[in-house]
Image: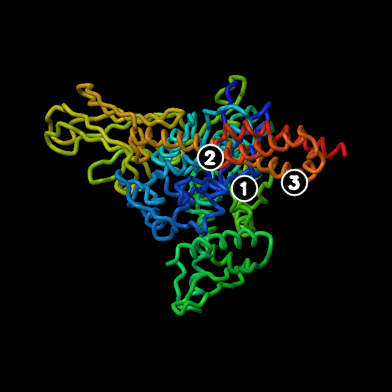
Amino acid sequence: MEKVIGIDLGTTNSCVAIVENGTPVVIPNRGGYKTTPSMVAVTEAGKRLVGHIAKRQAITNAENTVYAAKRLIGRKWNSPQVKNAVATSSYRIVEGPHNDVRIVLREKDFSVPEISAMVLQEMKVIAEDYLGETVSKAVVTVPAYFNDNQRQATKDAGEIAGLDVIRIINEPTAAALSYGFGRNIEKTVAVYDFGGGTFDISVLEIGAHGVFKVIATAGDTFLGGEDIDARIIDWLVSGFQEENGIDLRQDRMALQRLKDAAEKAKCELSSVRETEVNLPFIISSGRNEALHLQRTLTRQTLEELSDDLIERTVEICKQTLEDAKLTKSEIEEVVLVGGMTRMPKVQQSVQAFFEREPSKGVHPDEVVALGAAIQGAALVDDKQEMVLLDVTPHALGIMTFGSYFEELIPQNTTVPTHRTKIFTTSRDNQTAVKILVMQGESQRAEENELLGEFILTGLRRAPKGQIEVEVTFEINADGIVSVRAKDLETCLEQSIQVTATSGLTKEEIKAMMDNAKDDLVDRRTSEEFEGAKQEAEKLIAEIEKLFPQVQQIVASSDFGRDAIEKAKAIVDKARAAIDRRDVTSVKEQIEGLTRTHRMFKGVVAKT
């Protein structure tokens, strides 16, 4: 059976899992960690770095290190969230050619799906190293409240990374799959997912026969741990400015150090009452004095700084229960997902709202990837009895006369589904109708997301209101939206399959895929060389350590002197191959080095 990996593409960290012998397992990376930072950097030499290695050099290379790219994926340049990121990020964000977002690294523009693809490619490599075979299929998770453009941009990122994303599923739904997998339970559960960049709440019914039915979902795609970090940074910056009259935000390296310190302090305050933020030599004053930042942050201060953000998550939970037409007492279990749920204040707020202690039965950082892997296995295994019924997170409809939004498919409608509505013409002798397909919750069309448009032409001339046009919306199991418009009198029809856009053309995606392939080949070759180099250098060091002893023992015979010369030649050849970075030659020399080392050890052992 073909292997399908499950990937949680997170704002702060990403995670990859697979189902092995019926059991979902998280795959550790080369460092043994089960999660990998969702960070990408480009070095001065033009080399791409991903994960822990990118995070380790973030302070010294702040302008060329990207974090939290997920908060920008699929967004338009003029959105308020992008404006916020432009003002607060240590890396440069610019407008792309399609009103999209681009990130500048070493004077080269990268699209956000391209940056996310580097993280997905790292997940693919981690899985392939673990499995010892090529992986091409994946289920990737997204926040439940992502719109169609954000979902499409995530799919494009998968394609650029060389992955066939066979399904995009919602993070809270994935967490529920993992929570209910193999447990044969019947429960109504709420999944409260508060991560690094996004917040989601989903209410699901889990049936005893593997049926997972989402009743309602809601969230905020720009609310997470990053915002709490930003509050800590503001607190540190304003305190420093009061004392020294210097705004640390103007220095990119200082800003990256503050970001690291804020995240560390926030994590520490989940287990201690207070922590010290100590950043020596944070900046130089105008008189070239080195200035230091040292402040004590208490858990109480952190809770005061983030109280309104946590309260926003509770308000969204309240609205979701109303949408689901359920009372708090009907929720039988509350599952906590995402790194922010480790914060005591978050746990207390969730407990106070739902009036029950949340379940601690799942790992907040790993549960989403495990759920994605479970869904992946179910999609390729006919024997898996699992049914997943998800909902559309946003209302779908069209723009009507006066720039109003007319909803056809309400938010939280179970998919697949279809809805039909009849509209009349708004002007006399109107011969064409422009259908603008939109997604969102606002009654004002311009405040919603435009997904696509088409024109129904050839209508007969008639006074306004006399031509009836039937509009039908259809969403299939993959979330693909089709819209059809039909003149009821003439049966004239026009339709569109709404393909959301990530802001990238097919040609751009193809070019990015080729770049990603080349980069992966370079990286694999580089890693192979580094491994061979380490092995060769270790053997050279061992041989050179034994040289004096061996020379003393065998120097008296011609045979011995000849063996010493040969050994020296092998060491020299290996060194030359290392200098040339010739991986094939280094590997060939390892065999000779191993024989020489074995011989030297044998000579020494005999004496």
x and y percentages locating residue 195 in the rendered image:
55, 50
Residue at x 62% of width, y 40% of height: 572
x and y percentages locating residue 97 in the rendered image:
29, 45
Alpha carbons under labels 2 and 1: distance apart:
52 Å
**Amino acid at circle 3:** Lys
Residue 176 falls left or right of residue 69: right
x and y percentages locating residue 143 in the rendered image:
50, 43
* Tally of numbered tags: 3
Alpha carbons under labels 3 and 1: distance apart:
56 Å
492, above or below 170, in the image:
above
- Counting residues from the N terminus, which is met first, the one under dot 3 or under dot 1? 1
Q: How is the image coloured?
A: rainbow
**Amino acid at circle 2:** Arg
Residue at x 60% of width, y 53% of height: 350
Residue linked to disc 1 = 336
Residue linked to disc 3 = 545
| Quarter of the rendering containing residue 29 | top right
Q: Which image quarter holds the C terminus?
A: top right
**Dot 1, crowdedness within 10 Å: few (<14), some or many (≥20)?**
many
For the residue pair 110 and 309, the one nearer the viewer reads as 110
For the residue pair 518 and 235, the one nearer the viewer reads as 518
Residue 462 falls left or right of residue 555: left
Residue 200 appears in the picture as rendered: no
| Quarter of the rendering containing residue 155 | top left
Q: Secondary structure at mark 1?
A: strand
| Quarter of the rendering containing residue 422 | top left
Residue linked to disc 2 = 580
